[in-house]
Amino acid sequence: MTSREHNTETEVNRRQLLIRAAKAGAVAGGALLWGALFYSREPVRRRDEKIYTFRDYRAPEPAKTDSFAVVHGTDREKMVRAAVDHLGGISRFIRPGERVLIKPNVGWDRQPEEAANTHPALVGAVVRLCLSAGASKVWVTDVSVNDPYRSFARSGIEEATRQAGGRIRYTTDNDFVQTDLKGEVLKIWPVSRFYHEVDRVINMPIVKHHSLSKCTIALKNWYGVLGGRRNRLHQKINESIADLAAAVRPTLTLVDATRVLIRNGPTGGSLADVSVENTLLAGEDAVALDAWSLRYLDLNVADVPYLGLAEQRGVGVSDWASLNPVEFSAG
């Protein structure tokens, strides 16, 4: 037998269900009315994302000569200052108040002795030099392949930058902006936003072997501006490197050949693959600097197709001897 309490509870539940149904119908009717009144055939417009382009970072004061410097020594601070002085001094490249970005190779979780990254002492010396010229800020950045925090720390570049008065800018997933590289392979691509927030850019590659492109020096170092799936570019790596070289025109290039990774690049990991050369190159023609540096890897210009492609696009000259480089010792 059903109890009176149970009948009463059932009636209450039915009443609540009817009330809820009525409320839901009212809400749905209101939504339909609102939609009818305010319906538009215009499609929903997404906010257009800004497309950036690289500015021309080249030196504000024209060079009096196309020469470049090749400096030998063991005191990296003195080598940097001597090389830049030969080119007219840091004030020729950096004006007071300008914002400067330094782009070393910090792709790998390696120590300085392993020669997979630019030597930290060179980076620190360039930071100090830029600040002495009156730069308002000096940033050091790269899009590392390995974990960036470990790469900057173990390479010694984080500490060297901090002690010199600069700032490391780690590039996170939110720090890329769409940039038109105007290349044959590289069109619109995500690029570290820090390049669009500075006035001058200094390229600081290291000379080392590369398993795919045969070498990575100044031109290949620009891979470190890119986000996205960079491995997609490997199928046309020479064209991609030439595109980057034409897109990013730095203020100055300093090539680290103090310790050269002659095998098993670009990651390295064995001291047996490192050759101590105690050399620094400085200049404005990155193609010539790359071409001169090939000697350390037992290569010539014909072995590296992207040098010829970059030369065709007006980036520089592969005939480095035509620039009459000056070679000397310092420190």
Image (cartoon, grey):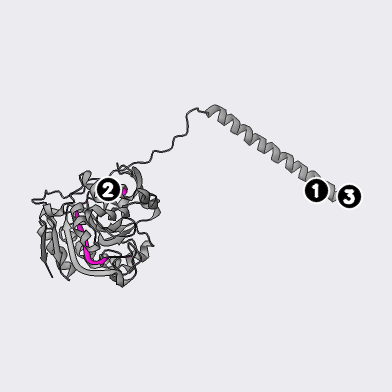
Residue type of the residue flagged with mark 3: Thr
> In the rendered view, does 148 fall on the left or right side of 278?
right
Identify the residue at image location x=18%, y=49%.
316
Q: Which residue is mark 1?
A: 9
Q: Earlier in the sequence, mark 2 or mark 3?
A: 3
Q: In the image, which disc is placed on residue 242?
A: 2
Q: Where, by quadrant of the figure, is residue 32 drawn?
A: top right
Residue at coordinates 37% horizontally, 49% vertically from top-left?
Answer: 235
Residue occupying the far left of the picture = 64
Residue 96: in magenta span: no
Q: Residues within 10 Å of mark 3 (few under 14, many from 20)?
A: few
- Mark 1 and 3 residues: CB-CB less than 8 Å, in contact? no
Earlier along the polypeptide chain: callout 1 or callout 3?
3
**Residue 105: percent from left, percent from top:** 29, 60
In the image, the segment drawn in magenta is 240-263
Query: In the image, 80: left or right of 228?
Result: left
